[in-house]
Image (spheres, rainbow, N blue to C red):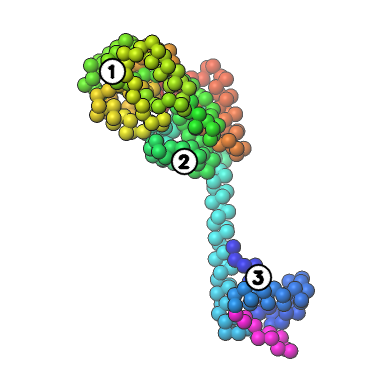
Amino acid sequence: MYNRQLDIFLCVADCGSFTKAADKLFLSSTAVMKQMNRLEKHWGMRLFTRTNHGVHLTPAGESVYKDARFLISYSERALEKARQLENEAATTLRVGTSILNPCKVFMDLWNRVNDRFPQFKISIVPFEDRHEEILSVIDSIGQRFDFLVGVCDSAEWLSRCRFYPLGEYRRCVAVPATHRLAAQSLIKITDLYGETLIMVKRGDSPINDRIRDYIEREHPQIRIEDAPAFYDMDVFNRCARENCVLSTVECWADVHPSLVTIPVDWEDTIPYGLLYSKTPAEGIVQFLEAVEQIRQNPSVPWPADAESGF
């Protein structure tokens, strides 16, 4: 971090001679003198008084000498601290979590395989569900996060990271607790006639686009309004505020306390799984291989089999 010419400067000052310093540094005396000349020119000050009997520090040189020892020591401590942080990062799996993308699924998996990875620790890293910022969150996978858990068929997301599918969730709708459909246990498509259905806008999700095509073609009695391509709490608040119907998935049933989530009688599902870097570290690959092994064991219940949602 510091200028390595300081090492030569200190040696010359301690030896009082370019020649003696050169012998100690295993350099030529010419090379030592050139280095000191460059250092003086770079800083714009004289550091040494040259005489036939050797060199002596100028007042400016004396000042630099006193501070150089501290600078070198501080620099070495800073580098050591950075190395420790790097080593810690290499043995820590950073898992993102938010209201819409909680990390419980990851932790369920980790609790099954952690005995195989005693070198790793888990760090939970929170982030905000904001549709205008979510792509920067996805871009930070591999830097800020090692894993995110998410419902995903987003073309934008999948262009930025890898996706390890773990299962699928049923498509549902959410309505305010006071809505006329709130008491139903299953929604038929015809129950939505005359309603405003909020869905993610067209273009990023093939599954949502397919559902929109079906509704627009076969059930024009349902009015569709766009939501952002990526949901956040504003979308759920809009549903509650406008007393309309929101296209959602079963894992978000408890996101908003004023909304009731009800399954729909269409067969569409959406995949969920682990989002990770396009260039994963070896530890990430090993973890995913361990997850794949337990997935291949039919006697082990899968997280989504035990409960609905994250």
| Magenta span | 45-55
Instruction: Say which element carries label 1.
Output: loop
Q: Quadrant of residue 20?
A: bottom right
Q: Is residue 92 above or below residue 202?
A: below
Find out whether residue 48 is within the magenta segment. Answer: yes
Residue in the foreground of this view, choosing between 118 and 186: 186
Foreground mark, 1 or 3, reads: 1
Identify the residue at image location x=78%, y=74%.
Answer: 28
Identify the residue at image location x=68%, y=77%.
Answer: 37
The kind of residue tagged 1 is Glu
Q: Position of residue 140 (x, y in %)?
A: 50, 41
- Pick out the residue farthest to the bottom: 52
**Is the residue marked by circle 1 packed among few (<14), some (14-19), or many (20+) residues within 10 Å?**
some
The kind of residue tagged 3 is Gln
In the rendered image, which quarter contains the N terminus?
bottom right
Whichever of callouts 1 and 3 sits on the residue coming sooner in the sequence is 3
Mark 3 and mark 2: Cα distance apart in space: 41 Å
**Is the residue marked by circle 3 packed among few (<14), some (14-19), or many (20+) residues within 10 Å?**
some
Residue annotated with mark 3? 5
Q: Position of residue 239 (x, y in %)?
A: 29, 27
Instruction: Say which element carries label 3.
Output: helix
Q: Mark on residue 296? A: none
Q: Mark on residue 136? A: 2
Q: Mark on residue 195? A: 1
Q: Position of residue 106 (x, y in %)?
A: 47, 31
